Amino acid sequence: MIGVLENRLPPEVTRTTLYHVVRLVLRLYVGSLLVAGVYSLLWVADVAGLIPEALLSTIWIGIAVMGSLFLVLLIPLFYTSRSSHR
């Protein structure tokens, strides 16, 4: 399969670059499966009535806060890693 991709891509794209892209895609896929699995478990527990409403709302607020903090920290890290002043 890599041979087919190598023939269609420009020579600047090496086999190592293709492996890095595939590794990144697989990491994103596994991460999305984990997030979807956690959300599914929370939803099933909510429908089954296993989690009290106060705890469930605290969990959702915690997830939202962690996601927001992640994005707030990710933006400066992204621009710092892209800068050429090292």
Image: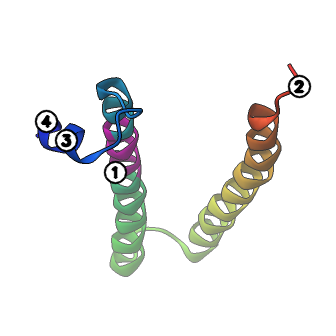
Residue 16 higher or lower than 51, as above or below: above
Tell me, yes or no, whether the two marked residues, 3 and 4, touch with CB atoms within 8 Å.
yes
The answer to which of 66 and 32 lies nearer the viewer is 32
| Residue 3, numbered circle | 4
* Pointers 4 and 1 in contact (C-beta within 8 Å): no
Residue 84 image-quadrant placement: top right
Q: Is residue 2 magenta?
A: no
Q: Residue at x 41, y 32 (%)?
A: 12
The 10 Å Cα crowd at callout 2, few under 14, some 14 to 19, many 20 or more, is: few
Q: What element carries label 2?
A: loop
Mark toward the start of the polypeptide (4 vs 1) = 4
Q: Quarter of the image holding residue 13?
A: top left
Q: Position of residue 27 (x, y in %)?
A: 38, 41
Which residue appears at 56% of the width and 69% of the height?
56
Amino acid, disc 4: Gly
Residue shown at 60%/62% (left/top)? 59
Residue at mark 4 to residue at mark 2: CA–CA distance? 38 Å
Q: How far apart are marks 4 and 1 (CA)?
A: 23 Å
**Amino acid type assigned to the residue bearing label 2 in the image:** His
